[in-house]
Image (cartoon, rainbow, N blue to C red):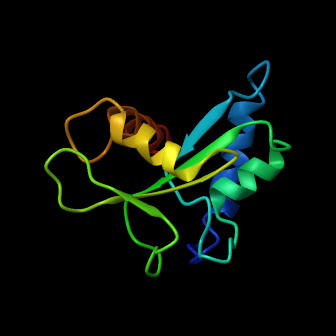
Amino acid sequence: MTYEPGSFYKRELPILLALLQQLERPPPTIIVDSYVWLDGDHRPGLGAMLYQELAQQSAIIGVAKTSFGDASWCIPVLRGESRRPLFVSAVGMDAEEAAKGVQAMHGRHRIPTVLQLVDREARAALG
């Protein structure tokens, strides 16, 4: 599928839903390597789309590595010694709480360990 700015969810959402359907019930919180919201007007990104598809049963935390627009609606989180923030947004929970959780995640570097591992496994599965 060709990349379409703001439509990342079209490629990723079906994969996430297929994985989550293998669980007895959705987890209380899900972290996605993407945005929940694409702007300050709450235009839905992958995280918001997933939240709706799960009937709002799981809080979704979006952790983006690059800025989409000015990303002023997100909470910038610095980790490790990096001067480049991660951009955190959330639905179904307080965004400040989500940002503190991302800040506290395991790992000494900018990207939390669990996100590095998931990214590595996803890339290996694709190819």
Rendered location of residue 90, percent (x, y): 59, 52
Q: Is residue 23 left or right of residue 1?
A: right
Q: Position of residue 12 (x, y in %)?
A: 63, 53
Which quadrant does the C terminus fall into? top left
Q: Residue furthest right?
A: 55
| Residue most extreme to the left | 81
In terms of depth relative to the viewer, which is nearer, 106 or 50? 106
Q: Taking 88 as reference, is 122 above or below it?
A: above
Image quarter of residue 16 = top right
Image position of 30 with respect to 8: above or below? above
Q: Looking at the rendering, in which quadrant would you find the N terminus? A: bottom right
Q: Nearer the viewer, residue 80 or 26?
A: 80
Count how many numbered circles sit on residues in the image. 0
Residue at 72% across, 32% down: 20
- Does residue 72 appear left or right of residue 84 in this picture? right
Lateral position of residue 49 relative to residue 121, left or right = right
Query: Can residue 119 be seen here?
Result: no
Give percent across and percent down for residue 108. 20, 36
Residue plotted at (63% across, 34% down) = 29
Q: Is residue 44 visible?
A: yes
Provide residue 46's location: percent of width, then percent of height.
64, 58
Spot the residue most to the top.
24
Residue at image position (55%, 52%) is: 95
Judge whether 1 appears above or below 81 on screen: below
Residue 112, picture quadrant: top left
Question: Which is nearer the eye, 68 or 72?
Answer: 72
